[in-house]
Every structure is written in C-alpha cells, then in structure tokens.
Amino acid sequence: MLACLHAALHPDNALRNLVCFTTPINAEGMALYRQWVMSKAFDIDRLVAELGVIPGEMINASIQALRPLQRTSNQLQLLNNVNNDAFVKANLPADVRDKVKNGKHLGRDDYMRWQQALGKKGWLVYTWPKKHGGPGFTPAERYIFENICAEEYAPGIIPFGTKMVGPVIYTFGSEEQKAKYLPAIRESTVWWCQGYSEPGSGSDLASLRTKAEKQGDHYIVNGSKTWNTMGHWADWIFCLVRTDPKAKPQEGISFLLIDMKTPGITVKPIIMMDGGHEVNEVFFDNV
C-alpha cells in the first residue's frame, strides 16, 4: 500500500492520472502517510484548489498526486499547536479512546464529552469560517487535524450539526436563527439528527410524502422518516417536508427545524445485524 502511495504521490504524475483505492488505510499506515507527506514541501491548499477535494475527507477513497511547493506558516503553526500541545491526547477521554480502538459501540455521552472538549478549544466546527465562529482552517489544516484525530483513535465528529444544518443556518438563516442555533452547535450542547429518507423514498426525495401544513405562524407535520441516524439521542431534527402539494414533485419541499421533544414525535429503533442501535424510524403525528 505504501508503495502505491509513493507512486501516486510522485510529483511527475499528472494530476489527471489519479490512482484510487477502496482498501482502508490502518492507523499505522495513516501515520506513515502523514509523516511522508509532511516531510515534503507540498502546498495542499493548491492541490485542493486544483482538484476540488479535501484530502482529509477523501483519504480512504483516493490518493492525490501532489506538486512540490512550499508549506505555509499557518500549516506549520497548526502542526505546532496540535502536536506540541498534545491537545488531542490530553483531552480525549481514555475510555472513549479505548472503545474506538477496540471497535466497541459508543454512547451519546462518549461523543458529547469529546465534542465539547473540541468546542471549548474552538475546533469542533473546524470546517466553519471565522466569521461564523469557526477556526477558519484551510483545507490543509483540516487534513492535518483529521489525521491526528484518527491516529489518536478519536471518535468521528457527528456531522449533522457541524457539517449539515449549521452551514445551512449560517448561510440562509435569519440573524435570530443564527443567534439561537449556532452557539449550541459550536459547543456541542445540542444534538441534531437528519430527517430525509422515508419508507419508499430514499435517494429519490422528490417522492417524499411527509407533509407540513401551515396554520397561522406554525406548521403541522404528519408522516414518517426512516434510517434516521442517532435520532434516539437527538434534541432537534432537520426535516425535508412537503409544504406545497400542488407543485411538481421536485419543488414544494421545505427544510424545517423541529424540536424532538414536541408532542406527537415517536422514535422506534431499527436494530442492525451486529445488535447495535444506531438508526431509527421517526413518526410525526400532528406535530
């Protein structure tokens, strides 16, 4: 695998001739890979600009060809902050690290303790720009941060708040909505889940049937969602619902934020083959 990495990373390789792998890289291989990359004078930001990808989010699927340039002072500073201060080692709870390392199921508290530690550092929403409370990491800095977390067996950051609803709110939400929802996402004090798929309506969201009827200043929601990940732990859910039944199927769909404590919501578990409870059905009865 490392030989393939070396070949794919060779500067003589054209950017268009990428070598893709589907085999996961283990922790030892990832550590060697990061050391090899960071020992070279690569400008990963330029790579991302040319390829349109973020290596840290693509690393188990693609190995990018890199051009030898100069690392920036910001990249070196992040390495110094993360490695020398040993933030991840010092703040990742030992019991959570052991669970991840040994492939055990994690509970809500396991994720929350780690994410709240990151929130205090300002790194939980590490993909957010500074103007919305994020650290403003470059793609290269994200890559370094993700790899270090993986090497230390940190749990993956739950994406529903940080990468899904949060950016929607700070891009399209009102100032009132930003003030209400974004701080809790940055601090990991509120758990979000996703309500997209339905029975008979998976990737084809144009066929969704959960409806929301506007009554005065609020909506009444009826329907169901399935394959809802970690909804049994969630405080809020963002849902796609049909608000205009007269529009063509691809239109008339709205994005609602719903408090999971609202009367009329029922969460039923879907138990997986390994006995784990991660996904659910969620029912809305006059919510």
Image (cartoon, rainbow, N blue to C red):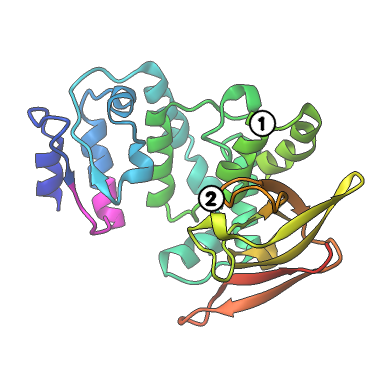
Residue 253's spot in the image, x, y percent? 65, 48
Q: Which residue is mark 1?
A: 172
**Does residue 223 appear to the left or right of 208 in the view shown?**
right
Q: Which residue is mark 2?
A: 157
Is residue 47 part of the magenta span, yes or no?
A: no
Crowding at mark 1 (Cα within 10 Å: few <14, some 14-19, many 20+):
few
Residue type at mark 1 is: Phe
Q: Image quadrant of residue 230?
A: bottom right
Residue 74's spot in the image, x, y percent? 42, 20
Q: Tell me what residue is drawn at x 18 percent, y 24 percent.
A: 67
Of residue 207 and residue 235, the one placed in the foreground of this image is: 207
Pointer 2 or 1: first along the chain:
2
The region drawn magenta spans: 20-31
Of residue 218 and residue 80, the one placed in the foreground of this image is: 218
* Labelled pair 2, 1 in contact (Cβ < 8 Å): no
Residue type at mark 2 is: Ile
Of residue 85 and residue 32, the one placed in the foreground of this image is: 32
**Does residue 272 appear to the left or right of 4 in the view shown?**
right
Q: Is residue 277 visible?
A: yes
Q: Tell me what residue is drawn at x 36 percent, y 41 percent.
A: 56
Which disc number belongs to residue 223?
none
